[in-house]
Amino acid sequence: MLVNSINMLQKAKNEKYAIPQFNINNLEWTRYILEECEKNKVPVILGVSEGAAKYMGGFFVVTSLVDALIKELNITVDVCIHLDHGSSFEVCKKAIDSGFTSVMIDASKYPLEDNIKITKEVVDYAHQNNVSVEAEVGHIGGEEDGVSSDVYHATLEECIALAKTGIDSIAPALGSVHGLYKGLPNLNFERMALINQELNIPLVLHGGTGIPDSDIKKAIECGISKININTELQIAWHDAVLLFVKENDKVYDPRKVIGSGQENMKKAISSKINLFLNR
């Protein structure tokens, strides 16, 4: 059923595993993720960027699609629809009013004082509607949906200040990047563990694609309770579809073309589930 992220993330924090956030882009992706998470009996957060929501027809289309698939596929695991990197209060409000059960307000590009002010406004509105809130501090590097930034590691003091807004989870920038890494990931595990020790709320790791399994496991040990995956699923789908089109150049049915990425993508989803839950 549709839920916010509070209970699932607190349970993950207490029991030292991570909930997967898989970003969705269309009907097929949403279905593949829901089916694989149901098969593995694991709760899931469906991440939706502003760009993906626009592509899919709008926030209300997304919630209607997810709700319908949960019913049609008999999904029994908890499902959270989460706005990924909401750029303003207005965008977060629109997602909440459209039925999203969780939002991320990303005001990290602003000075800390402004980040806190914007985040608090979102928290106040979201909590009135039983919606969970994630926020970001520091700069997570790389590029997502055409928005890019350099890496700037969050400090403990910044995290404590942002947590006072009442957010339910926090994404401190600690060396991860969106998209593909140029070189090796360099996560700040020491600071990650310190922040986790000082805060009661779960920590979120953005840019999970390309991080070695050993570093993922260490991050979970250091307090990461939610890990976002997007690019890795895109690559898994792309590689399978590319091969299918090459070998079946006369096939033009979009259902067959898009669906040719299903098996490869589900393998990637299952692999991440097993890694995050230490199975």
Image (tube, rainbow, N blue to C red):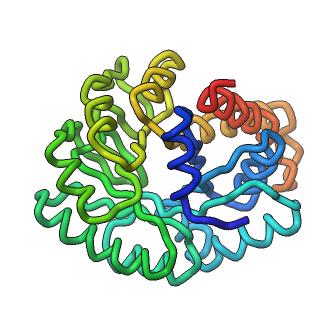
Residue 74 drawn at (x, y percent): 88, 61
| Residue depicted at 77% across the width and 40% down the height | 261
Left or right: 100 as drawn, with respect to 43: left
On the image, which quarter does residue 248 sit in?
Answer: top right
Residue at image position (14%, 66%) is 114
Q: Nearer the viewer, residue 222 or 257?
A: 222
Residue 220 vs 154, above or below: the answer is above
Expressed as whole percent of the image width and height from the top left, the position of residue 95 reads 49, 76
Residue 178 rendering spot, x and y as whole percentages: 40, 40
Q: Is residue 39 above or below residue 95?
A: above
Left or right side of 116 for 279: right
Q: Nearer the viewer, residue 122 or 145?
A: 122
Which residue is nearer to you in this view: 199 or 111? Answer: 199
Residue 227, visible in the rendered structure:
no
Residue 22 in the image: x percent, y percent?
60, 47
Seen in the picture, residue 146 relative to 205 is either above or below; the reply is: below
Looking at the image, residue 94 lies above or below residue 12: below
| The C terminus: image quadrant | top right
